[in-house]
Amino acid sequence: MTDTLHLNEFQAYLLAEDRSPVTITGYLGDVRLFAQWYEGHYREALIPASLTNEAVRNYKQHLLDQAAKPKTINRRLAALAAYAHWLEQAGYVKNARNPVQGVKAVKETALAPKWLDKKQRAALLRAVDKEVDDAVRRYPRLRLMYLRDAAIVKLILFAGLRVGEIIQLRMSDIVLDERKGSVVVREGKGTKRREIPLNAKACKALLDYMQVRPDIESNELFLGQRNEGVQSKTIQRAVQRFAKKAGLKMVTPHTLRHSFAKALIDAGVSLEKVATLLGHSNLNTTRIYTTPGVQDLEDAINELEDF
């Protein structure tokens, strides 16, 4: 296959173009995968002249039928486009146009942001406080629910807890006073125990909730409408409701956990400390938060305004 398709020469071309090792490996692998599919589909080996627009369209449809991710399909189309371009440059084919031209990329669903920036976090907190104030003044029956949801959101945003860890919290896991406190996660991911200090905002939210929490025998910290423990969907809906009020889209509880970690990194907290607070056993898992986000890059460009 390699000799017929001149992949060694294609690799040399990519190296000369200063493509990254990851890109080169990916392009070569994608061309080989296309060649395998072509042979199975057309019952003949792929040669450069066989890389036609029809074949590329059929391959795209095959990937769609296999439920391949849009990102995967688009990457493979990009690899074939680069390969076809090189084939013509090298004189192995005489195409009037690149065979990938006209084959539309698959629309990729926008992903939720990894974290909220400082302004977005502030907007979310304003929305939470406003909803709680409105509920206390106008809807007394909903006061418990809103105070509970506010405490949950602030506990994730200021302590980085996972949804499963919120659900498992017991009354004895919280230590509070007016200005400081802590939360103990008894069985985090990997059954790791950790204790997380709480800031004043998280403490106040928890104290406000505890004052209206029903005095029942259940030891679960957060209670549902029937005094049972909250479920994950309750937490997800609370986050989504507050986020919508703040004008934020596609915000999940995990977005808030990411935001907690990113805020710590931006404040200069060491990776080791952030990993401990998050309950990570591998620093590489925490290192993602040192990768610049879109806002970080925009801020960097804005620094050039006075250059």
Image: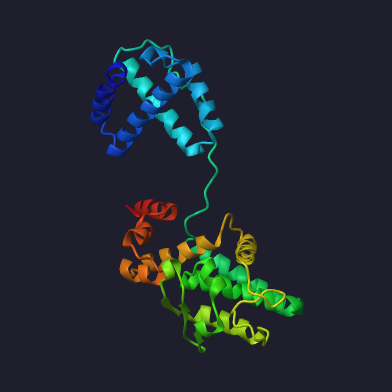
Placement of 83 over or under 22, stated as above or below: above
The quarter of the picture where residue 242 lies is: bottom right
11 left or right of 173 in image: left
| x, y percent for residue 84 | 38, 20
Placement of 293 over or under 179, stated as above or below: above
Going 59% across and 55% down the picture, which residue do you hit? Answer: 249
- Which quarter of the rendering shows the N terminus? top left
> Residue 187 or 73: which is nearer the viewer?
187
Q: Is residue 192 visible?
A: yes
Q: Is residue 270 visible?
A: no
Total marks shown come to: 0
* Residue at the extreme bottom of the image, as rendered: 177
Q: How is the image coloured?
A: rainbow
Going 29% across and 34% down the picture, which residue do you hit? Answer: 19
185 left or right of 272 in image: right
The quarter of the picture where residue 191 lies is: bottom left
188 left or right of 243 in image: left
| x, y percent for residue 215 | 67, 88
| x, y percent for residue 79 | 39, 29
161 left or right of 225 in image: left
> Residue 12 or 188: which is nearer the viewer?
188
Going 33% across and 62% down the picture, which residue do you hit? Answer: 282
| x, y percent for residue 91 | 30, 12
Placement of 129 over or under 303, stated as above or below: below
